[in-house]
Image (cartoon, coloured by chain):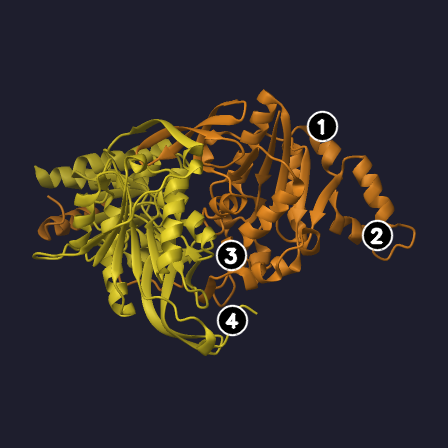
Chain colours: A yellow, B orange
Amino acid sequence: MTSLPNESRQSPGNEVWVFIEQRNSKAADVGFELLSKGHKLARAMGGPLKSIVIGSGMTELANETFQYGADESIVVDHEALKYYRTIPYGRILTELVRQHSPRIVLFGATTVGRDLAPRVASATKSGMTADCTDLQISDITYLRRDYKRILLQIRPAFGGNIIATIITPDNPIQMATVREGVMEMHKIDGHVHGKITRVPYQRDELDDLVTIIEQHREESKVNLKGASIIVSGGYGLGTKENFRLIHELAHVIGGEVAGSRAAVDAGFVPPERQVGQTGVTVRPKLYIAVGISGAIQHRAGMQESNKIIAINTDPDAPIFSISHYGIVGDAMEVIPRLVEAYKFKLK
Amino acid sequence: MYKSVVLVKQVPDTANITGNVMQEDGTVNRAKLPAILNHEDRVAMEIALRVRDQYGGTVTAITMGPPRASDILRECLYMGADHACLVTDRKFAGADTLATSYVLSEAIKKIGDYDFIFAGRQAIDGDTAQVGPQTAEKLHVPQITYLEEIVSVSGKSVVAKRKIEGGYEVVRCSLPVLVTVIKDAAEPRPFKAKRVMAFKGARSLLEIEKLVDGNPLLSVEALVHEYESRSLLIETLTMDDLHLDPARCGVHGSPTKVYKVESVVLSSGDHEHIEPTRAGISRLVDKLFEDHILG
């Protein structure tokens, strides 16, 4: 019903776009991370990579996107756009997408990206997949038909019991969000140039349906992404009281405290310290997972750590399958011994 | 007086997956999972009820789902909803967020005027957080996502606090508006025994039809009339009731497709076993120092 024979379909575009989120005129890291990934996707698609920059005083930021692989930056620059607001940003992006029909549009899975992307996807009837942990371009056969250069959007689903690959085969436009830190950022060496295309801002009376009265933002003091040692606790610790052991171990060995989603949901650890698909993705030198069973969503956020130690009472916990060292035992006994052994070693 | 619509979803309790739910081929047997009211939608119900309690008005809970989704609508009635509406049709099956938001937005239009549409930020089975904004777009209303608190409502506008990275922002927005709420926005109220007694008999049209099925002494029409007069009728809307475009519903209206599903089967990896004894742990720490991982 929706699928027409291959020949008669309008051939889809080949452009890859990345929405660059800015806060106080500074780009959020996730935009550059997505450009680095988008660069590879655009090569595979045989099309250009474009950064979409909306804000106020954006020239410098637009130039910065070329260092991460953008061939062109589409810039909508106006004072009225200094702060992100759903309606003007959504309207502008919807118009751009309709005009240029990009094949792929990527957004950071932030409070901005997750507010904006579905709105634009709805207006342009695009496919939309949230929180992808990997993106690939591939030729595929789906329902006995061959498709060239399809975007595979890979994400854990259903409580982490499955990994789903989502495609948008018969729709010209697909959008996806990716969490900050999931893709690696690569700056291109040397002098890079790109083209800036300016699109004028035209005010619409609906733009001001929402006005920002106050905005309060603190630079996060938590820097999990940059930490070289992370001690992470899970629901298996049982109580917030027991979770104090995680803090103690982290303090002694100079690491950051983190937790699984279950630990965050149980209130053991604040959300900004959540590691996993819906939290932060980390690649530290050492990751110690305590009382974490190791659901796929959690592993997605830490499996590229250099060394992983798992401590769990359940010898069959999936976390052991990706760890380098496994300790089957009670955290309440194991952690004090770790602390003791470390202190002894330092003497 | 403010009219609120609350979008709720019945979800499999993915947090409590036990042995018999995982099948031998490693896939999930959805039918064996308990079906629950998505927690953040329950929080959305609570926020809607608080607006009603403070400023007056009505609260209508809507869900799109299979017939058994009436269970969560009854829960909304127990919490305090004034009306409940089940949007159901076999042709809605397999809908992604785009198709779902189309059906929901048409159902909301059918129900009539509203000042607020509340919904949970996301549902635990997909975690997409897309249906809220997509429904808002289709209704051409503004949206406030990640709501932490309704600060005040006056006339045709609301002041609300929403969560952003590293902080919050306070926005003023004209009504009507679609609002998605986060878990911490409110603690949902428990059911009142009186309301449970009053509404446990609430039934959707499909449930009434099932009751009548094969019993010549009962008539659907008469029963519907009776349930309605006792405020126990869960309004039921199908594709025909909503005059929907079939090409935009269910599988046909969903641009995204599941290409491949891999169950997560883990082999026990070749990690090194460390004894949980003092000696075992000391040796591990020694090794980490040697490898310059620690120290």
Q: In this picture, is B275 found above or below A206?
A: below
Please state which of residues B278 and B104 is positioned toward the viewer in this rendering: B104
Q: Is residue A67 left or right of residue A162?
A: left
Distance from Cα at disc 2 to Cα at disc 3: 33 Å
**As shown in the figure, which amino acid type bears the numbered disc 4?**
Ser
Q: Quadrant of residue A140?
A: bottom left
Whether labels 1 and 2 belong to a single chain: the reply is yes
Residue A36 at what x, y percent from top left? Answer: 22, 57
Q: Is residue B29 left or right of residue B233?
A: left
Q: Which residue is mark 3?
A: B96
Element type at mark 1: helix
Ranked by sequence position, the earlier of labels 2 and 3 is: 3
Residue B50 at what x, y percent from top left? Answer: 56, 25
Circle 4 marks a residue in which chain? A
Distance from Cα at disc 3 to Cα at disc 1: 38 Å
Please state which of residues A137 and A259 is positioned toward the viewer in this rendering: A137
Q: Which residue is mark 4?
A: A3
Circle 3 marks a residue in which chain? B
Distance from Cα at disc 2 to Cα at disc 4: 41 Å
